[in-house]
Image (tube, rainbow, N blue to C red):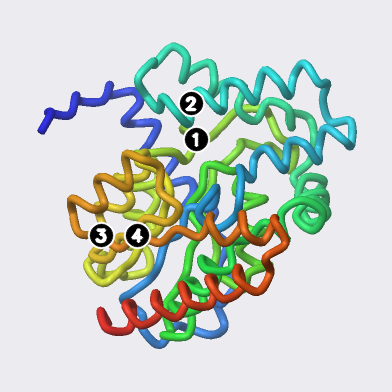
Amino acid sequence: MTEKRPRPRNLQARSVLAGEAAAAAAEVESALTPPTDAEAAAFFDVDNTVMQGASIFHLARGLHRRKFFTTREILGAAWKQAYFRVVGVEDPAHVADARASALGFIAGHTVQELQDLGEEIFEEAMADRIWPGTRALAQLHLDEGQRVWLVTAAPIEIAQIIARRLGLTGALGTVAEHVDGVYTGRLVGDMLHGPAKGEAVRAIAEREGLDLRRCSAYSDSYNDLPMLSMVGDPCAINPDARLRAHAREQGWRIRDYRTGRKALRAGAFVGAAAGAVTGAVAAGATLRRRR
């Protein structure tokens, strides 16, 4: 087993700051109905875990249609985001550049403006991309009286919209700096990616009094090992090759709903629906046995 290289201190500090900022900005939708299982919660990555594709891409495309920025700007941002997601923190110089421009396209716009447009964009580009199997898993946790949080590198504003539309507890996402309700184009700390997600989960667990050994986490990406490894019940959803191999080695649960989506596209609605229901029932049985 290869030894992990220590992360540069400045990147570590930015991850901690990003995690703490995400936890501080987390929106709790169920504040008036406290969970009956107050020590357990579930944490879900969003991109390719809860929904097909990248939420930041759907958001950016919707904003581009509304003339927020030029085609050249969106292509440059897309390249940097893709590089960051694949490479992570391997190239500090590139990561710094990606961080500096990650949410630069909203500089000068108001928080309220992005929230209002985010609602529209969710309806037109995201609502029909939610994986039914993952949604069923989240509902199982809610039915057991647990909190359910989204944890994503997407802007906290769009993450909160997704969580609210799905009836979840709230969301942890990348926090963009704003002054008097207007975005500056800078991030608070770093993107909520990789180690920063682990820091966010740790911060919210401390704030909410959660026992991480009784918590669950779901993701499609090997980059989310910091989050997956810190809970007692990790699960790989639609995993990439590295995460699938790691999950098998560790004996983690694995769920893949992508086959059902392809069948649905081909017109095999009945088969896809049956697959989604079967997957949800099997996942529910496993989850309840664990509880």
Which amino acid type is marked by label 4?
A: Ile
Residue picked out by circle 2 = 84
Q: Residue furthest right?
A: 66
Q: In which quarter of the image is the C terminus?
A: bottom left
SS for callout 1: loop
Which residue position holds label 1?
191
Q: Which residue is drawn at 42% across and 56% down?
A: 237
Residue at coordinates 47% horizontally, 33% vertically from top-left?
189
Q: Is residue 5 visible?
A: yes
Front of the two marks 4 and 2? 4
For the residue labelled by badge 3, is the local secondary structure a helix, a strand or a loop?
Answer: loop
First along the sequence among labels 2 and 1: 2
In three-dimensional space, the C-alpha distance between marks 3 and 2, rounded to whole angstroms, equals: 26 Å
Residue 161: % across, % down: 68, 59
**Residue 228: mark:** none
Judge depth for marks 1 and 4 and give the one in front.
4
Q: Where is residue 215 in the image (x, y as percent from the top left)?
A: 31, 68
Q: Distance between the residues labelled 2 and 1?
A: 10 Å
**Dot 1: few (<14), some (14–19), or many (≥20) neighbours within 10 Å?**
many
**Which numbered disc flags the more N-terminal residue, 1 or 4?**
1
Dot 2 falls on a residue whose secondary structure is helix
Above or below residue 109? Residue 117 is: below
Q: Kindly identify which numbered label has been placed on residue 252.
A: 3
Q: Which residue is drawn at 51% across and 65% down?
A: 134
Please identify the quadrant where the N terminus is shown.
Answer: top left
Question: In front here: 119 or 203?
Answer: 119
Q: Name the residue under label 4.
A: 254
